[in-house]
Structures are given as structure tokens and as C-alpha cells.
Amino acid sequence: MLIGIVGATASGKSGLALDLARELGRAEIVSMDAFSLYKGMDIGTAKPSAAERAEILHHQIDVLAIHQEASVAQYQVCAREDVHAIEQRGNRAIAVGGSALYIHALFDKMKFPGTDPVVRARVEESLEEHGQAALYRKLRELDPKATESIHPNDQRRTVRALEVIELTGRPFSATMPKREFLRPSILLGVRRSLEELDARIATRTEEMLEAGFVSEVEELMRQGLANTPTAVKATGYQPIMRHLAGEITLDEAREAIELSTRQLVRKQMKWFRRDERIQWIEGSSGELLEQVLDVAQEG
């Protein structure tokens, strides 16, 4: 039985996963966070500490350099291999994260269409010639359902959707994940009120800055963060980049980080509400771990 602990950013799911792993014994953790894949992006992604990772083995953390493009399809292959290897060792796999597509990739029956560099280049040329708005209108005409989950400004996913439509002759939305487990699994969700999450986000942001977030971003910028395909999109990093460029003050950067994190949380919560398989546990409960253990041990 694969255990998943999901929830919005700042809900406390990572700490809960560690506590659960300690209690279960012979357990290892698989990350389902898109940006924890990147080496050097530690503070801003709230990775487990070196001590925590020495105590409990973690997977799918620090596997990419920042100049590499994160691929959900590749993540699916590697994360599923990790789970299989964990179980072959006689250990329990606990997956934790809040990146919706990565959760689907690990848990659900989901196949990724292939890619074709020629088709991709043709769509990207159309993007350069006609602009994102025109491409998005085309996608809405071909597959209106796909645009329900793709933001009008999301160039990367718009291009990918049009590439898949041309390659398969089917709507891109037909390739989107269905909420059907690949194998026996449990999804546990850590739920908190928006007010509590907002307060935790403010505290978390302050702790990140005190821990050296500015220095982390400064080092990553020396490595070329600004020109990376996906790493630069991690929540919180661009406000610090703007601060280092002298465009905004540190206080303004702090406010921007908190705002973007609050926006991310609301997007995550909207997605989680649509998944009826998630068994919700109140994050503020004094018996949070006990509740999780009861469900995990039943599985």
C-alpha cells in the first residue's frame, strides 16, 4: 500500500511525513515537489534538512541541475522505480508533496504522449510569429476543455497541448490524468483554514529570509538561474531576483513572496477539493500523527 501525504504549501505535510516515517520504521520518503528536484534550491523550496535526510532516506530531491528542464514524464519513471526499490528492500514508501501533476504521475493510471522536435519547433515558431494570445485562441478552438486547466499566459503548456493534438489527433485533455489509482494506495490530506495557512506562510517567509534565502538566490543567479527553462519559475525566487537587481526593497520582496505563495495555496486547494479520494485530517489537531497512523496501519 503506497501512502501519500498531500496538502497545500505550508500545511505541514513534510513534517508529518517525517513523523510518520519515524513511527512506522523502515520507511523512506519520495518527494512529489516539482522544484525540490533541483540542486541548490533548498531554502526557497523548504527541502528537508540535511539531518532529516540523513535520518530518513529521501528520493527525488537534488536530482537535477538548475539548467535542466523538469519533466513530469521522467519523474513518473524515476519515482515509480524508487517506490519499487523501497518495497523490494522491505521498507514502506511514503510519498509527500503538493504538486498536482506530480501526485497524479506517481499515483494514477497516466500515460504521457511522446514528443516530436519537428512538431514542437513548428508550434514554437508559430508562438514567436503570432504570439501567445493567438496560440491560446487556437487551443481553445481545438480543445476548450484543455484551456480550463491551462492559464492563458502559460506558453509552455499551450505549446505542449498543441504539439500533443497534432501528434495524436486527439484532444490534449484526453491525455490528462484520471483519478484512478495505478495500485493500492492511500491519499491523506493535511487541511488547515485559509487564515491559518496565511499566518504560516508569513512565518515561513520570514524564516526563509533569516535562513539565507537571499544568499541562496544570489548564488543560483551566478549559475544562470534567470535563463533556466523551469527552475526560475519556483515560487518566491523571482521577487528575490528583483530585489538583488535593485528593483524592489527586501520588504517588497517579502510581500511579493507571501502574495505568490497565498495564490499558489488557493490554486492547490481548488485542485485538491476535486479529488474525492483524499482522506482529510485537520492539521491543527493535537492528534494529527495518531490519526495518520490509524489510517496507514489499516493499509
Image (tube, rainbow, N blue to C red):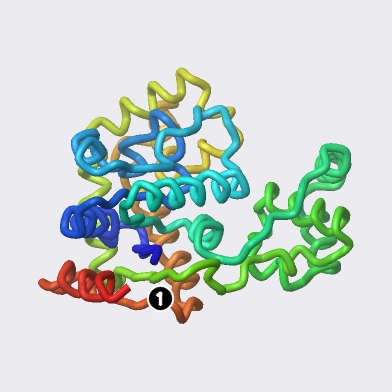
Pick the quarter of the image with the C terminus: bottom left
Give the residue pinned by disc 1.
278
Tell which residue pokes out farthest to the left in this image: 286
Is residue 215 placed above or below 121 in the rendered structure? above
Is residue 86 placed above or below 222 in the rendered structure? below
From the top left corner, tell me how far across and down residue 273 is, in percent: 45, 77
Name the residue nearer the viewer: 214 or 120: 120
Residue displayed at 65% across by 52% down: 154
User: Could you tell me how many numbered marks the image carries?
Assistant: 1
Is residue 118 placed above or below 270 in the rendered structure? above
Residue displayed at 44% across by 51% down: 83
Tell which residue pokes out farthest to the bottom in this image: 276
From the top left corner, tell me how far across and down residue 103 is, in percent: 49, 60
Q: Say if residue 189 shows up in the picture.
A: yes
Name the residue nearer the viewer: 115 or 89: 89
State the image quarter where residue 198 is shown.
Answer: bottom left
Q: Secondary structure at mark 1?
A: loop
State the image quarter where residue 118 is shown.
Answer: top right
